[in-house]
Image (cartoon, rainbow, N blue to C red):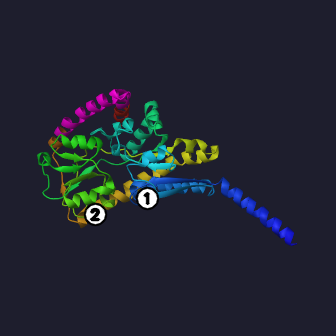
């Protein structure tokens, strides 16, 4: 009897160990805290676990695996299987997708940002660019047009930005320099301290980040319609890890992306933006709105020179920069 029990127990343990060995766990590196910006990653994890019956899980780490500027490096060496990063944090590493960070492109909605990003991510030059890091682009993190929150005297005209230190990356930074601002590139997690200490007087973010990273806590003003552009922050996977998935696991992962993005956009539009106005009112933050003439002049001064410089620089890198720019602007024109 004891021998039978022992044999049965051993068999059960063997089955258990086999099932455990077959389960797939991926580590996912993001930063900050759970917020609108990571809702698609969170939803993707829920969908993957549910559709795999718990056999495929995504373990999301907020800053525990890597610094936000090092996520692409971590992907390249397989330190984790999935990560989120922003192109403007290291434009030299991912120049092809920085085309989406050029100022005044004219993207009008999160839905359009999603569509254009997903289309660009399939372009051969973009695929090859990220392949240098053993990375496959999975999905974007669509963000609205950025605006500035700042401390001190409100810049009621664009001339008031002359000499102002502003946290702004990529094309937004280039745009702000055309009105005399001094753009400073730093990650989101560094901005609150920089504002509080006076290193910068203003910060360029989407609304969720102004709330999540505390830039509105000691702010005096916010621009309602500067809209110089946005940043592109994709979610990528380690290509080797993606290829090592079973056909079923890969189908579950890739087949869950659209629903994850649907959830993200709904959350941003209907929860984050609903909270933004009250958050400003509660803190007595002044809203600054510029005239149509000033915005038109800003666009004219910033857009074309930034695009020309981007095309020249990235053509020299060996990218089909004009082709990528024309591809993006063509999609925007079709949707306008």
192 relative to 139 in the view: left or right: left
* Near-viewer residue (297 or 249): 249
Q: In which quadrant will I find the N terminus? A: bottom right
Asked whether residue 336 appears in the rendered view, the answer is: no
The percent position of residue 104, horizontal first and vertical second, equals 27, 39
Residue 286 % position (x, y):
18, 59
User: Decide: marks 1, 2 in contact (CB < 8 A)?
Assistant: no
Element under label 1?
Answer: strand
Q: Is residue 116 magenta?
A: no
- Residue at the (54%, 49%) spot, across then down: 256
Question: Label 1 belongs to which residue?
Answer: 62
Image: 158 above or below 19: above
Residue 76 versus residue 51: which sits nearer the camera?
76
Quickly name the residue at label 2: 279
Extreme-bottom residue of the structure: 1
**Range of magenta residues:** 297-326
In the displayed structure image, the side of residue 278 where residue 262 appears, left or right: right
Q: Could you tell whether 236 is left or right of 97 in the image?
A: right
Residue 331, position in %: x, y? Answer: 38, 34
At a point 48% along the width and 43% down the height, the residue shown is 76
Q: Quadrant of the C terminus?
A: top left
- Near mark 1 (Cα within 10 A), the count class, few <14, some 14-19 or many ≥20, is some
Left or right: where 69 falls relative to 204? right
Q: Give whichever of discs 1 and 2 has the lower sequence position.
A: 1
Q: How many marks?
A: 2
Distance from label 1 to label 2 (Cα)?
Answer: 24 Å
Q: Judge whether residue 319 is colored magenta.
A: yes
**Measured along the vertical axis of the image, is residue 117 above or below residue 280?**
above
> What predominant SS class does the magenta segment belong to?
helix
At 31% across and 29% down in the image, what residue appears? 311
């Amino acid at each position: 009897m004891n021998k039978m029990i022992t044999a049965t127990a051993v068999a059960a343990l063997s089955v258990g160990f086999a099932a455990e060995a077959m389960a797939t766990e991926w580590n996912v590196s993001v930063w900050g805290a759970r917020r609108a910006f990571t809702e698609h990653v969170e939803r993707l994890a829920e969908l993957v676990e549910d559709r795999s019956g718990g056999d495929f899980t995504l373990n999301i780490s907020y800053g525990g695996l890597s610094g936000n500027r090092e996520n692409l490096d971590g992907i390249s060496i397989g330190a984790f299987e999935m990560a989120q990063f922003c192109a403007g944090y290291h434009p030299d590493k991912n120049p092809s997708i920085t085309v989406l960070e050029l100022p005044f492109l004219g993207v009008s909605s999160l839905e359009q940002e999603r569509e254009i990003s997903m289309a660009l991510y399939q372009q051969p030059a973009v695929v090859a660019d990220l392949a240098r890091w053993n990375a496959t682009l999975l999905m974007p993190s669509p963000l609205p047009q950025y605006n500035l929150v700042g401390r001190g005297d409100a810049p009621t005209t664009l001339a008031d930005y002359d000499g102002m230190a502003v946290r702004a990356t990529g094309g937004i930074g280039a745009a702000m320099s055309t009105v005399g601002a001094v753009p400073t590139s730093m990650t989101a997690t560094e901005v609150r301290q920089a504002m509080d200490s006076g290193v910068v007087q203003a910060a360029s973010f989407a609304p969720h980040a102004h709330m999540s990273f505390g830039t509105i806590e000691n702010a005096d003003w916010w621009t309602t319609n500067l809209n110089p552009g946005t940043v592109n922050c994709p979610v990528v996977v380690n290509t080797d890890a993606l290829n090592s998935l079973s056909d079923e696991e890969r189908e579950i992962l890739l087949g869950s992306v659209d629903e994850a993005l649907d959830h993200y956009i709904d959350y941003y539009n209907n929860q984050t933006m609903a909270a933004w106005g009250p958050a400003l009112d509660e803190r007595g933050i002044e809203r600054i709105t510029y005239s149509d003439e000033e915005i038109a002049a800003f666009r004219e001064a910033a857009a074309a020179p930034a695009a020309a410089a981007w095309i020249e620089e990235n053509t020299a890198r060996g990218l089909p920069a004009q082709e990528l720019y024309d591809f993006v602007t063509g999609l925007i024109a079709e949707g306008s």
